[in-house]
Amino acid sequence: MSTKKEEYSKYYVPDQSIWPIVGALALGLIAFGAGHFTIEASKQEEGFGHYVLGAGMLVLLIMLVGWFGDQIRESRQGLYNEQLGRSYKQGMSWFIFSEVMFFLAFFGALFYARMIAVPWLGGASNNVATGEILWPAFEAIWPLTTTPDGTTTQAMGWFGLPLMNTAILVVSSVTLHFAHVALEEDKRKALTSWLIVTIVLGLIFLGFQGYEYVHAYRDLGLTMQSGIYGNTFFLLTGFHGLHVTLGAILLIVMLGRVLKGHFTKDDQFGFQAAAWYWHFVDVVWLLLFVFVYII
Amino acid sequence: MSTTVTDTHGAHDAHDDHHDHKPTGIKRWLFTTNHKDIGSMYLWFSFAMFLVGGSMALMIRAELFQPGMQIIDPHFFNQMTTMHGVIMVFGAVMPAFVGLANWMIPMMIGAPDMALPRMNNWSFWILPFAFLIMLSSFFMPGGAPAFGWTFYAPLSTTYSTDSTALFVFSMHIMGMSSIMGAINVIVTIMNMRAPGMNYMKMPLFVWTWFITAFLLIAVMPVLAGVVTMVLTDKYFGTSFFDAAGGGDPVLFQHLFWFFGHPEVYIMILPSFGIVSAIIPAFARKPLFGYASMVYATAAIAGLSFLVWAHHMFTTGMPTFASLFFMYMTMLIAVPTGVKVFNWVSTMWRGSMTFETPMLFSLAFVILFTIGGFSGIMLAITPVDYQYHDTYFVVAHFHYVLVTGAVFSIMAAAYYWLPKWSGVMYDDFLSKLHFWCSLVSVNILFFPMHFVGLAGMPRRIPDYAMQFADINQIVSIGGFLFGFSQLIFLAVALKCAFKKGEPAPAKPWEGAEGLEWTVPSPAPYHTFDVPPKV
């Protein structure tokens, strides 16, 4: 008991901080700005939305730099203890769980469309009459290259670029693991190199992904407007791409900290959190590759 | 003196080492990392939203006082029903529970604060911004969202007004707030319990919030996903919910209710915890069947993921699916029945007294059970074809949400107000509040069962002549209930300004738990040294 009590009495309640409310202001500006920007863009009007959105992004950036700066400073001053470290780790795991559930919503939409919505439109289950009356010419196939109202597109193959991207992301997960092993063994040089390799692989992935989108829009006619196949394709890969971007930014910040000599075997929460996040986006990609591209 | 919470403050506050130091002025509230301050802000915010959402309900009831169009036009009526629902669910009930969690969980488990105090402040302050954005949509061309709080497609996509984008983005940041709040609660409970406070010793309020937090983290992201699809369907030409592009409007309902059904348990599980604290205190007996309460809560939470389509029986699902969701839904009555049985057994042969928190709790047990029974009726697929989208449904969910969730929040407020403020609440006013609320809430919601069974549809600003009498009674009940809540405002303000008898550390003879071991009002930093459990 006594050890637990000791640990407990060293509990650290952080100071007051300006950053949470700055963060709330940033999110408020972003939501308000993004809302108005969306409305204005859909009507092709000039408005104030994008200014508010931009201001919100700026405030968010200032908040992130300030808040993380405070955290890092306090952590370096040794104010944090093991209990707080556990709280951070658990908090990060639950955050990743919430991200899993976010992707689940989009995978759910994909499965529903493939297993239920599209077959039913074609007359499956007890929907023969629906199929006959609404769109008699509609053929229920996946990928849905011709929608009921006649929009056509081509499907994205899995061979080539997507396969290469899969390999890149899997390898980047492995290299990040090597970086972590190097950190555990206190091999700073290896840590830095493996981390750089991981970041570069991540950026290559993003580049290829952007190229694939251009290819989809220009050559395949696969767009956001081309029916449920294109919708699930772009929303799933798009949100995944956003998460890779965020993960890459996290890793770049970690690289900066590694270069400044931060992190040891016992003090590495920031690095670990970024690494977990990276492995998580990797796993999501594997599911994406199977369910969006191959099957 | 051992190293304590306040001693380890960082560089900015190095001068601060006496124990009950409070930052002063507006900065205390804006930059706070204190679970009690944040809890109070949540509670006041929630009450303000309760009044805003309530005044929208009164506008609905004023319009429905007589058949025909009287006061507001149908489009504005739709905005009222929508915003009433959104504000009550996301602005009043959920933040009230988070406020209670903030205040009580650290004190109940013997922790000095929440595990992640700065994120805690962030979670709170997102809410006022989110609701400002939501309410600002009233001033846009076309007005506020008018598609019901369930925002079914295509009402929210093809047929919605401009403000949909604001609705979507404010939902997004509300969701972030909820997820961060839930992560904080769950990490606090897992990581901050005092030595000896093992899981099966935790008060039930902590247990129910533990499970609620899990539900929040699991389903709020799904809500974020579905509002995103609404946004892209409306503004970016996707067709998730449009059959012409290969999608399906029913997909919206599946996704929404996958979030929505766990969401209704998010709004009731903490109530179970509150009532499980109050009834033993005033029956002066330990809670009957503690362990079964914990397992029942977990069972309800687990089942909540498997019942969502009982909101959708009339969409033409295959019979197999309807039957599955019907039986799963009825199964929930079993763990819920365990809970009601345990509360009644706790009171059996107890030395009962009827202070205001107990009155609200008793009303909760009886009236929530009525809401539960009408829930079982609605779960029966064939008869749901008749009840669907009628006032019977409105009666059902207001019995579980108003006489359920809101009554338990009132009970909690009266139970812990002495601890929060250090003074006893005004007994006469509190009893007046209870009896006015109890009588008026039944005038308000009970007759809705009858018009619903007779076929009056919900969400329509006009109705057939034969429903006129009952609607008048309902509207009178609505106004009585609405204005009765101002009595609570008076009670709360009196406590906030310390008008009242000083409260002892433990004002309730039979109350148990760590929160009663600290003085009233609870010191700014509770538990400098870990309590012994």
Image (cartoon, rainbow, N blue to C red):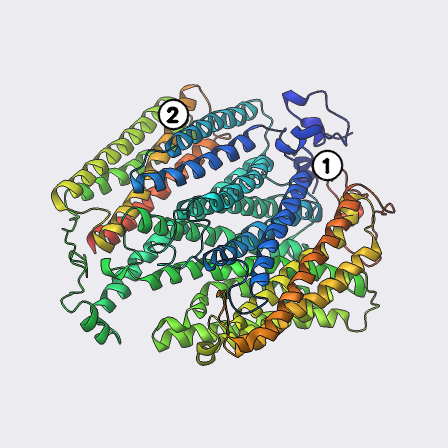
List the residue tagged with mark 1: B525
Residue A187 location, quadrant? top left
Residue A11 location, quadrant? top right
Against B113, residue B389 (above or below) is: below
User: Which residue is at a point 80% across and 47% down the rendered structure image?
Assistant: B517
Q: Chain of mark 1?
A: B
Q: Is residue A241 left or right of residue B211?
A: left
Against A288, residue A214 (above or below) is: above
Q: Secondary structure at mark 1?
A: loop
* Three-letter code, disc 2: Leu
Q: CA distance from mark 2 to mark 1?
A: 38 Å
Disc 1: CA contacts within 10 A as few (<14), some (14-19) or many (>=20): many
Q: Position of residue A25 (x, y in %)?
A: 51, 33
Q: Is residue A16 visible?
A: yes
* Residues tagged by mark 2 and mark 1 found on one chain of the structure: no
Against B488, residue A26 (above or below) is: above
Q: Are marks 2 and 1 in contact (CB under 8 Å)?
A: no
Q: Position of residue B124 (x, y in %)?
A: 58, 41
Q: Position of residue A223 (x, y in %)?
A: 20, 46
Q: Is residue B526 left or right of residue B319?
A: right
The residue lying toward the viewer, choosing from A83 and B385, is B385
User: Which residue is at a point 46% across and 49% down the rendered structure image?
Assistant: B144
Q: Is residue A94 visible?
A: no
Which quadrant holds the N terminus of chain B?
top right
List the residue tagged with mark 2: A255
Q: Chain of mark 2?
A: A
Residue that lies at the very extreme toward the left in this rendered image: A219
Against B387, residue B263 (above or below) is: above
The residue lying toward the viewer, choosing from B282 and A234, is A234
